[in-house]
Image (cartoon, rainbow, N blue to C red):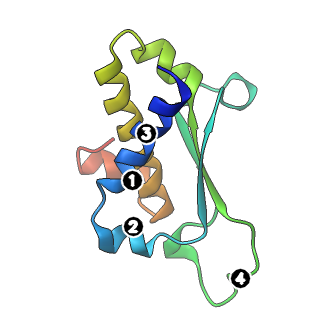
């Protein structure tokens, strides 16, 4: 898949969120990167202060960052463009859940990991 399609899949995932939830997202950048840091086995990564941990101290800080890693996703799912797009969406929504303070453990309990 080319860059435009990869980014479109990520944007489609964000667009699938209810408007109220999208509107509540705050100070977060979503970026497509080629590979995870230091060869870590990641498809995506949330870095920042989850919404549930922000208080009155939170301000004048750089945006949180959701990284979606193109290389591992393409290696795992690139043979099937529909599956790749679905997996990109899954990773985007998974990392957005972390932005809202939902842990991996809770995602497992919900059947959404």
**Crowd around label 2: few <14 · some 14–19 · many ≥20 (10 Å):** few
Specify which label sits upstream in the sequence, 1 or 3: 3
Q: Is residue 75 left or right of residue 77?
A: right
Q: CA distance from mark 1 to mark 4?
A: 24 Å
Secondary element under disc 2, as helix, strand or loop, is: helix
The CA distance from mark 2 to mark 3 is 17 Å
Which dot, 4 or 3, sits closer to the camera?
A: 3
- Do labels 1 and 3 touch, CB within 8 Å? no
Outermost residue toward the top in this view: 79
Question: What residue is rendered at 45% in x and 55% in y?
Answer: 96
Residue 22: image tag: 2
Task: Please tell me whether residue 19 is drawn above or below residue 102 in the rendered image.
Answer: below
Q: Nearer the viewer, residue 20 or 40?
A: 20
- What is the x, y in percent for residue 101? 46, 64
Residue assigned mark 1: 14
Front-lying residue, 20 or 107: 20
Q: Quadrant of residue 55?
A: bottom right
Q: CA distance from mark 1 to mark 3?
A: 10 Å
Residue toward you, 25 or 9: 9
Q: Residues within 10 Å of mark 1 (few under 14, many from 20)?
A: some
Q: Which residue is mark 4?
A: 59
Disc 1 + disc 2, Cβ < 8 Å: yes
Quadrant of res 5: top left
| Residue at horizontal 44 percent and vertical 42 percent from the top | 10
Q: Which residue is mark 3?
A: 8
Q: Look at discs 1 and 4 and give the one toward the viewer.
A: 1
User: Which residue reaches farthest left?
Assistant: 111
Nearer mark to the viewer, of 2 and 3: 3
The earlier-in-sequence mark between 1 and 4 is 1
Q: Secondary structure at mark 3?
A: helix
């Amino acid at each position: 898949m080319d860059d435009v399609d990869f980014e479109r899949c990520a944007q489609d995932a964000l667009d699938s969120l209810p408007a109220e939830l999208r509107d509540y997202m705050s100070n977060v950048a979503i970026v497509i990167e080629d590979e995870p840091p230091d060869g870590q086995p990641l498809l995506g990564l949330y870095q920042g202060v989850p919404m549930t941990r922000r208080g009155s101290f939170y301000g004048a800080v750089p945006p949180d960052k959701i990284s979606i890693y193109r290389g591992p996703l393409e290696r795992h799912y690139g043979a099937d463009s529909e599956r790749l797009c679905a997996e990109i969406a899954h990773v985007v929504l998974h990392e957005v859940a972390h932005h809202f303070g939902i842990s991996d453990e809770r995602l497992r309990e919900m059947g959404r990991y």
